[in-house]
Image (spheres, rainbow, N blue to C red):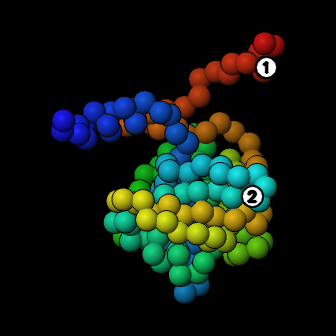
């Protein structure tokens, strides 16, 4: 049986994901990339995971510092997301950010949350790398998330569950 990559991509696109910008500092300058592959991994100890593509030109530059910050994007940050998804150029041009308290990695203004991490482990994961980050600091902002579903941007249109009295 032949593996159907197109079907695999289609099936994976039905899992709605949030969108993040993973950012770090190289030679005193901010660098970052858009990343959908982000997950909470452990509460004790506090770990997260991100999975940059091996073709990423930004991740190797961030990895040298040994730390990074994951910025969870809000629905109002679609344009910012698209800017960080392209290769090359100064992606931080015109982007308001401040240094994270622990590592100095970029915290992007207006993000729904940020998670400042040190690189704990790096694993080979096929055409990606799986990066385990130890959470050093974090904070939460306000707003609704920017989502990706079936290869397109999506937003939350309503809530279900306890918020509605269930």
Along the line of sight, the residue nearer the viewer: 143 or 96: 143
Question: Can the viewer see residue 95?
Answer: no
Question: Which residue does the image show at 45% across and 75% down from the upper left?
Answer: 60
Q: Earlier in the sequence, mark 2 or mark 1?
A: 2
Residue 43, numbered circle: none
Q: Position of residue 76 (x, y in %)?
A: 58, 42
Q: Outermost residue, left direction?
A: 2
Q: Position of residue 65 (x, y in %)?
A: 58, 81
Query: What residue would you read off at disc 1?
Result: 162
Q: Outermost residue, front direction?
A: 1
Q: Report the quarter where the N terminus lies.
A: top left
Q: Position of residue 48 (x, y in %)?
A: 64, 56
CA separation in Å, label 2 and label 1: 26 Å
For the residues labelled 2 and 1, say whether their Cβ atoms are less than 8 Å apart.
Answer: no
Question: Which residue does the image show at 58% across and 69% down from the upper left?
Answer: 121
Query: What residue would you read off at disc 2?
Result: 46
Along the line of sight, the residue nearer the viewer: 57 or 95: 57
Task: Reply above or below: 139 against 143.
Answer: below
Q: Crowding at label 2, few (<14), some or many (≥20) Cα neighbours within 10 Å?
A: some
Along the line of sight, the residue nearer the viewer: 133 or 29: 133
Q: Report the quarter where the C terminus lies.
A: top right
Along the line of sight, the residue nearer the viewer: 64 or 91: 64
Task: Reply above or below: 7 against 86.
Answer: above
Q: Position of residue 44 (x, y in %)?
A: 79, 55
């Amino acid at each position: 049986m032949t593996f159907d990559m197109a079907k695999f991509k289609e099936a994976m696109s039905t899992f709605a994901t949030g969108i993040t910008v993973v950012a770090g500092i190289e030679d005193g300058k901010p660098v970052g990339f858009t990343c959908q592959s982000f997950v909470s991994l452990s509460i004790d100890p506090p770990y997260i995971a991100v999975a940059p593509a091996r073709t990423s030109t930004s991740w190797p530059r961030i990895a040298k510092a040994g730390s990074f910050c994951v910025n969870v994007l809000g629905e109002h940050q679609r344009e910012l997301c698209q800017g960080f998804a392209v290769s090359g150029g100064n992606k931080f041009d015109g982007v308001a950010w401040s240094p994270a308290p622990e590592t100095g990695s970029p915290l992007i203004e207006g993000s729904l949350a940020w998670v400042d991490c040190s690189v704990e482990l790096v694993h080979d994961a096929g055409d990606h790398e799986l990066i385990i980050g130890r959470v050093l600091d974090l904070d939460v902002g306000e707003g609704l998330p920017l989502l990706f579903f079936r290869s397109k941007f999506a937003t939350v249109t309503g809530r279900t569950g306890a918020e509605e009295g269930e």
